[in-house]
Amino acid sequence: MKVLVLGPGGREHAIIRALLKDSAVTEVHSAPGNAGIAQDVPVHAIDANNPEAALALATELAADLVVIGPEAPLVAGVSDTLRDAGFAVFGPSKPAALLEGSKAFAKEVMASANVPTAMAKVATNREEAETALATFGAPYVVKDDGLAAGKGVVVTEDFDAALAHAESCFAAGGSVVIEEYLDGPEVSLFVISDGSTCLPLSPAQDFKRIFDNDEGPNTGGMGAYTPLPWLPEGFVEEVIERVAQPTVDEMARRGTPFVGVLYCGLAATSRGIRVIEFNARFGDPETQAVLARLRTPLGGVLLAAAKGELPADLTLDWDPRTAVDVVMAAENYPDTPRKGDAITGLDTANQRENVHVDHAGTALDGDSIVTAGGRVLAVVALGENLTEARDAAYAGVRDIAWKGAQYRSDIALAAAENRIQIPTQN
Ligand code: AMP
Ligand code: GLY
C-alpha cells in the first residue's frame, strides 16, 4: 500500500512513523512535510491546502490512500476533490469537517443527536448577555463567537469581567456564546470513523497554555500523555455510546457522513461527560503520544475507514506502557515565533532508549536543521509509568537546544502525582 500524508507538523510525523511500522505499507510520501519527516520519507513541496495540487500529486504517486492531517485542507475541500477522483481518503468531506469549522453547527448537531454538551446561549447585546450570565451563574464562560479569532474564551468568577468581555466583543461587531461552566478535567478522545462504525483510540490529555501551572495564553498544545490513569472504567465506552456514535449517525442521516477522526474534546464533570468541542482530525500534540503506543498496524485501519469498511468488532492493540510528549517551542511563541535558529542535540535525544523526536516547525538550512515555526518539535517517550515516561521525555528535551527554546516543565506532572480528580456533585 502506497500512502500520501498531507500536512507539515508533528502530528503528521507521528502518523508517518506509525505507517512505516505497518508491513502492509510499502511506501509513504509526505507533502509538504518538514525537515524531520524528510529524514524518513520522500517529501513533496506542494501547497497541501490546494485541492488541485493535492490531486495532481496523489495521481502522480498512484496513492492507494491519502491521509489528511490538519484542518486547513479539510476545510478547503481537499478530501472531496480526491474522493471524487476515486482516491481512498482518510479525512472528512468539507461539509462533515464543519463539526470543527463552526461552533454553532457543532452545537446544532449535538442538540439533534442528544449529545451532552455545555448549555449555551448566544448574546448579541448587553441585556441578552446579562440574562444569560444570570441564568448559568458563576463561574461565567463567555466565548467570542468566531469572528474575532484570538480573543477567545474568558472563564471568570467576576460578573463584571464576564460582561466586560461580552461588551468588548459586541463593540467589535461580534456576538458571544455564554455557556454553563464545565467543572472537570479535560480529555481528548480520538474516534476513527468510516461513516458509520466508531473505533476509539487511547484517551489523552493536552496542555493548552504556554506556561507551567496553566498560565499564559493558549497555544496549539504544549504536551500530552496517554493513557489517563485517573479516568473511571467505562469512560471511553460511554463517550462512544453517548457522544461519538450519535454524532456519526446524525452526520450520516444528514447525508454528510463523517469519515476520519472525530476528535472529542471532553470535560469529565461532576454531572457526567460533556463535550467542549469537536475537531475533525487527529489532535496535535496528543497524536504523538497516542500513536507511540499503538501496536495495531495503522495503515490497514485508516484504509478500512477510508473505504467505509471498518470492522464493527475491531479493537486496537496498545503498548501497556505510558507515553508522554513534551513540545519545544520557539522563542516568543504563541505570539510571533522567532525562526531560523540552528537546533542542536536531535541525534542525542533520538538515540535514547524509548525516546524519539517528532518534528513540527523545522526546516533544512544547508546541512543544519533550523526552527521554522512556533511549535518546533515534540520529544516523545514511553515508560512503565507516568514518572518514568516524564523523566525520559525531559531527558530528551534537555539534550536539545536552540536560541530561545521554551517548554513547559509540568507536562503530565499532576497526573503522575495523583492530583487529578473528577469533581463529585455537591
Ligand atoms: P474552546 O475554544 O471552546 O475549545 O475553549 C478553549 C478552552 O476554554 C477549553 O479547552 C477549556 O479549557 C475552556 N473552556 C471552554 N468552554 C468551557 C466551559 N464551558 N467550561 C469551562 N471551561 C471551558
Ligand atoms: N491539541 C489540540 C488540537 O489539536 O486542537
Image (cartoon, rainbow, N blue to C red):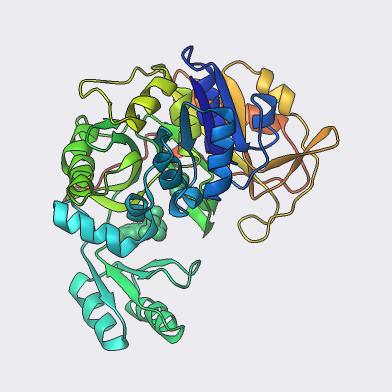
Is residue 100 placed above or below 382 in the rendered structure?
below
Query: Percent from the top left, x then y, of residue 355?
Result: 59, 22
- Quarter of the picture holding the C terminus: bottom left
Tell me the quarter of the picture where residue 27 sits.
top right
Tell me the quarter of the picture where residue 20 sits.
top right
Residue lying farthest top?
23
Work out whether residue 57 can be spotted: yes
- The residue lying toward the viewer, choosing from 157 and 40, is 40
Work out whether residue 426 can be spotted: no
Q: Image point 39% across, 36% down: which residue?
A: 204
- The residue lying toward the viewer, choosing from 93 and 249, is 93
Q: Image point 31% across, 82% down: which residue?
A: 124
Drawn side of residue 342 relative to residue 70, left or right? right
- The residue lying toward the viewer, choosing from 181 and 62, is 62
Q: Image point 23% across, 32% down: which residue?
A: 197
Drawn side of residue 2 relative to residue 298, left or right? right
Query: Percent from the top left, x then y, of residue 243?
Result: 21, 44
